[in-house]
Image: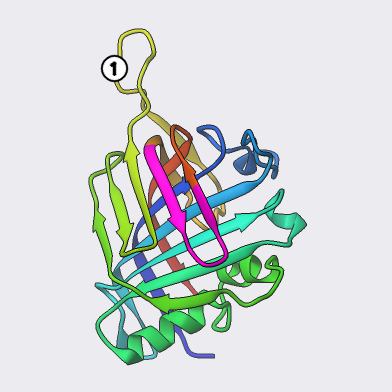
């Protein structure tokens, strides 16, 4: 297994109420009782066995019928990168074939592992808790800050997770909309949980 490292900006949109019950007790607190998510990694630096991966973006559409650890989930990742070599490496990482807990754990919870992975054009605007992402013809997410229902001022909330393997220091937001229309995953939601955070992974 080759050595690799990825670092950059992470965007998360999920079906839970802001804060996400999965972060605290391991179970979703969405109205549906399931987990539906769109997560994006904008890779700003990193490489795989000498191959530069900075400038690539991967967005992962995810769905589970209940809690993630209970399994029977689905995943479909989309990769925007500059070369076939970068795509091949990122495909293997996101399928859990090159180590790291996030990718190994998520793929182990899918009903038909590993995750599907395709190339697609991804547009990301990094703007803190007003960030947005779109995957051409497949998905979009528009983040927006939490605001006080009384005065309308921004409500700044952070969650810090020791040993967090997806993110460890996240700014919590909500979103105007997240929509996914992938072959095996489809949802259209608003006003739920979102995270803006840095990430750094290495195998």
Give the left or right position of residue 125, taking residue 182 as reference: left
Prevailing secondary structure of the magenta residues: strand
Give the left or right position of residue 20, taking residue 11 as reference: right
The image position of residue 55, as x and y in percent, is 24, 72
From this view, report whether residue 132 is shown above or below residue 174.
below
Tally of marks: 1
The image position of residue 177, as x and y in percent, is 38, 40
Closer to the camera in the image, 166 or 28: 28
Give the left or right position of residue 98, taking residue 118 as reference: right
From this view, report whether residue 12 is shown above or below residue 182.
above
The image position of residue 73, as x and y in percent, is 67, 61
Closer to the camera in the image, 96 or 16: 16
Closer to the camera in the image, 130 or 156: 130
Label 1 residue SS: loop
Closer to the camera in the image, 178 or 46: 178
Quadrant in which residue 15 is drawn: top right
Quadrant in which residue 85 is drawn: bottom left
From this view, report whether residue 99 is shown above or below residue 32.
below
The image position of residue 112, as x and y in percent, is 69, 74
Q: Extreme top residue here? A: 150
> Is-magenta flag for residue 14?
no
Quadrant in which residue 26 is drawn: top right
Q: How is the image coloured?
A: rainbow
Give the left or right position of residue 65, taking residue 145 as reference: right
Q: What's the residue at 65%, 67% (across, down)?
A: 105
- Which range is magenta? 176-187
Q: What's the residue at 68%, 67% (across, down)?
A: 110
Residue 178 in view? yes
Q: Which residue is mark 1?
A: 153
């Amino acid at each position: 297994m080759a050595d690799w490292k990825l670092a950059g900006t992470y965007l998360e949109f999920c079906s839970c109420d802001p804060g996400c019950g999965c972060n605290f007790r391991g179970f979703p607190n969405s109205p549906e009782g399931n987990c539906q998510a769109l997560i994006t990694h904008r890779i700003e630096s990193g490489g795989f066995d000498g191959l530069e991966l900075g400038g690539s973006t991967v967005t992962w559409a995810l769905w589970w019928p209940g809690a993630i650890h209970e399994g029977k989930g689905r995943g479909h990742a989309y990769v925007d990168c500059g070369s076939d070599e970068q795509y091949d490496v990122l495909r293997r990482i996101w399928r859990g074939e090159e180590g790291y807990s996030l990718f190994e754990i998520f793929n182990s919870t899918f009903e038909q592992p590993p995750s599907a992975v395709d190339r697609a054009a991804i547009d990301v605007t990094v703007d803190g808790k007003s960030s947005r992402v779109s995957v051409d013809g497949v998905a979009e997410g528009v983040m927006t800050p939490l605001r006080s229902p009384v005065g309308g001022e921004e409500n700044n909330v952070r969650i810090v997770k020791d040993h967090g393997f997806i993110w460890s220091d996240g700014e919590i937001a909500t979103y105007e909309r997240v929509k996914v229309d992938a072959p095996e995953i489809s949802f259209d939601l608003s006003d739920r949980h979102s995270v803006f955070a840095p990430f750094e992974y290495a195998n």
